[in-house]
Amino acid sequence: MGRSTNILVILGALLALLGIVGLAIPVFTTTQTNEVARIGDLKIQTQENASHAIPPLVSGGALVLGIILIGGGLFRRR
């Protein structure tokens, strides 16, 4: 039983941490390099930037679920 509570606490801590990061940094950008043309040894590439937004409801839900899992893991331990 001790191992499952440790997993709950660790999983809860990770979810809570991801929720906090999602609330602190709701928008992030990724870069993708695409090959447009290739003629022999010559390569023509482009870089595309894409912005991604994390909804506050998802971040808040992850934070709340993480806190619940931490509490459940600590409560089960006793």
Image (spheres, rainbow, N blue to C red):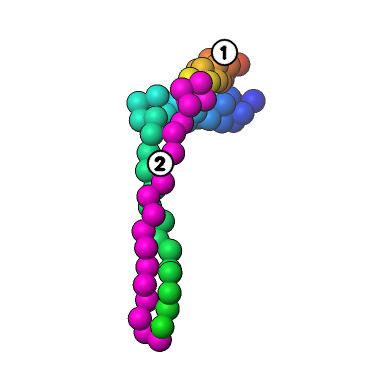
Total residue callouts: 2
Question: Nearer the viewer's eye, disc 1 or disc 2?
Answer: 2
Front in this rendered view, residue 32 or 15: 32
Q: Earlier in the sequence, mark 1 or mark 2?
A: 2
Q: Is-magenta flag for residue 39?
A: no
Tell me what residue is drawn at x 43 percent, y 68 percent.
Answer: 35
Q: Which residues are magenta?
A: 40-59
Query: Is 1 left or right of 11, judged from the image as shown?
Result: right
Residue wearing tag 1: 75
- Mark 2 is surrounded, within 10 Å at the Cα level, by few (under 14), some (14 to 19) or many (20 or more) other residues, namely few
> Disc 2 on helix, strand or loop?
strand
Q: Residue at x 37, y 43 (%)?
A: 29
Most common SS among magenta residues: strand
State the residue in front, 56 or 63: 56
- Mark 1 belongs to which amino acid? Phe
Q: Is residue 15 above or below residue 77?
A: below
Q: From the viewer's perspective, is 5 left or right of 54?
A: right
Marks 1 and 2 in Cβ contact (< 8 Å): no
The residue sitting at 40% across, 61% down in the picture is: 33
Q: Nearer the viewer, residue 73 or 12?
A: 12
Residue 19 is at least partly visible in this image: yes
Nearer to us in this view, 25 or 52: 52
Does 29 sit above or below residue 47?
Answer: above
Residue labelled with disc 2: 51
Question: Residue at the spot x=41%, y=46% of the render?
Answer: 50
At which x and y percent is residue 44?
Answer: 36, 72
Q: Which mark is residue 30?
A: none
Q: CA distance from mark 1 to mark 2?
A: 40 Å
> In which image quadrant can residue 38 be found?
bottom left
